[in-house]
Image: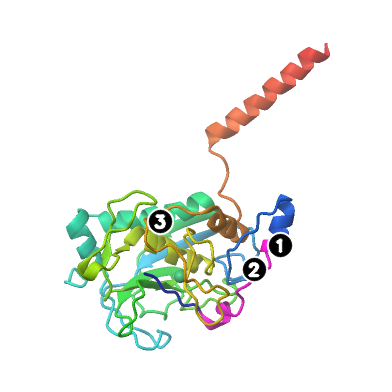
């Protein structure tokens, strides 16, 4: 159902080094299986220091833009997403599920990540460059023809090694394969995915986008079978990927996915004002209680 590809320099940095200190901190046999494109530094948006949050700007690539020189070999066509033509995945999804359904699924995928870690996503207008040829905004989403026989649903490219000093035009680009079949699965989390023509599983668009956005944020593949970031093997990957569960609705992050994204960006931001007030008032009550007791 899915594929991924990364800037080559990012791929070389895949590491599980963080799994050991995290496990030690927890003082339990739990280990994490997530992988990242950085190794405790960089391959994240904004400040390359791990544990710092990021504000990430994203756009839909302008309909009709081409494939730049950095596109994977075998890809062809121009960006079909948003054209309104017969191959436009947004048109297909909205026709089956109602106007706005595609954009809602995408927004939910962004929200799932920003609920888990210190991330803010802001949609902006696209600058109009070809795939892989613009450093602004950070994440750009489009759809092209992948190579003949390529069954991947999409590909997401990781963040720059150093976003502040060395912006990378390919970094953050997310391409759907418009030769593939997509749907919004009617089931709930964990339900079997519906099948389409030929008995093939349809790509649930929210789950797929959730996974690909994970790549654009700096996460590689894990071997957690029901994890959002579970993935196939590629040269350089550490997992054979043969048993990932691509057959059930998966729109919620596993604990391992959350640990991975929090290692890079830190936990989700400040508590809501109401929660802060409750905490403060709780402390006051405790202090008052202590004072009363001491008398
Ligand atoms: Zn992947």
State the residue in front, 9 or 278.
9
Q: Quadrant of residue 23?
A: bottom right
- Whether residue 189 is visible to the viewer of this picture, yes or no, is yes
Instruction: State which region is magenta.
Output: 7-19
Secondary element under disc 3, as helix, strand or loop, is loop
Residue 250, label in figure? 3
> Is 3 a magenta residue?
no
- The answer to whether mark 1 is within 8 Å of ligand 1 is no
Residue at point 52%, 55% (across, down):
119
Q: Are marks 1 and 2 in contact (CB under 8 Å)?
A: yes
- The answer to whether mark 2 is within 8 Å of ligand 1 is no
Secondary element under disc 2, as helix, strand or loop, is loop
Q: Is residue 234 above or below residue 211?
A: below
Residue at point 55%, 59% (across, down):
54
**Mark 3: few/some/many CA within 10 Å (<14, 14-19, 20+):** many
Quadrant location, the N terminus:
bottom left
Image mark count:
3
State the residue in front, 137 or 79.
79
Q: Which residue is mark 2?
A: 16
Residue 20, label in figure? 1
- Whether residue 82 is visible to the viewer of this picture, yes or no, is no
**Mark 2: few/some/many CA within 10 Å (<14, 14-19, 20+):** some
Residue 220, label in figure? none
State the residue in front, 71 or 185.
185
Secondary element under disc 1, as helix, strand or loop, is helix
Give the CA distance from mark 3 to mark 2: 24 Å
Q: Is residue 22 left or right of residue 244?
A: right
Magenta: main secondary structure: loop
N-terminal of the pair, mark 3 or mark 1, is 1
N-terminal of the pair, mark 3 or mark 2, is 2
């Amino acid at each position: 159902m899915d594929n991924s590809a990364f800037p080559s320099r990012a791929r070389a940095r895949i590491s599980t080094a963080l799994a050991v200190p995290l496990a030690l901190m927890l003082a339990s046999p739990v280990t994490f299986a997530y992988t990242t494109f950085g190794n405790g530094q960089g391959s994240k948006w904004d400040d390359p220091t791990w544990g710092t949050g990021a504000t990430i700007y994203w756009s839909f690539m302008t309909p009709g833009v081409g494939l730049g020189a950095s596109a994977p070999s075998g890809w062809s066509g121009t960006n079909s997403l948003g054209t309104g033509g017969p191959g436009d995945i947004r048109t297909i999804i909205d026709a089956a599920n109602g106007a706005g359904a595609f954009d809602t699924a995408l927004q939910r995928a962004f929200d799932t990540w920003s609920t888990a870690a210190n991330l803010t996503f802001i949609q902006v207008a696209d600058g109009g460059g070809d795939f892989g040829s613009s450093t602004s905004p950070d994440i750009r989403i489009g759809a092209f023809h992948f190579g003949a026989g390529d069954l991947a649903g999409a590909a997401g490219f990781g963040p720059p090694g150093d976003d502040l000093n060395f912006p990378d035009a390919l970094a953050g680009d997310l391409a759907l394969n418009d030769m593939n079949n997509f749907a919004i699965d009617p089931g709930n989390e964990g339900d079997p995915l519906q099948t389409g023509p030929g008995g093939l599983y349809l790509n649930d668009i929210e789950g797929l986008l959730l996974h690909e956005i994970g790549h654009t944020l700096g996460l590689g593949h894990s071997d957690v079978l029901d994890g959002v970031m579970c993935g196939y093997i590629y040269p350089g990957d550490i997992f054979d990927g043969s048993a990932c569960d691509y057959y059930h609705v998966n729109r919620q992050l596993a604990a391992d996915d959350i640990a991975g994204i929090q290692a890079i960006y830190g936990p989700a931001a400040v508590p809501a004002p109401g929660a802060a007030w409750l905490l403060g008032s709780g402390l006051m009550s405790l202090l008052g209680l202590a004072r009363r007791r001491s008398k």
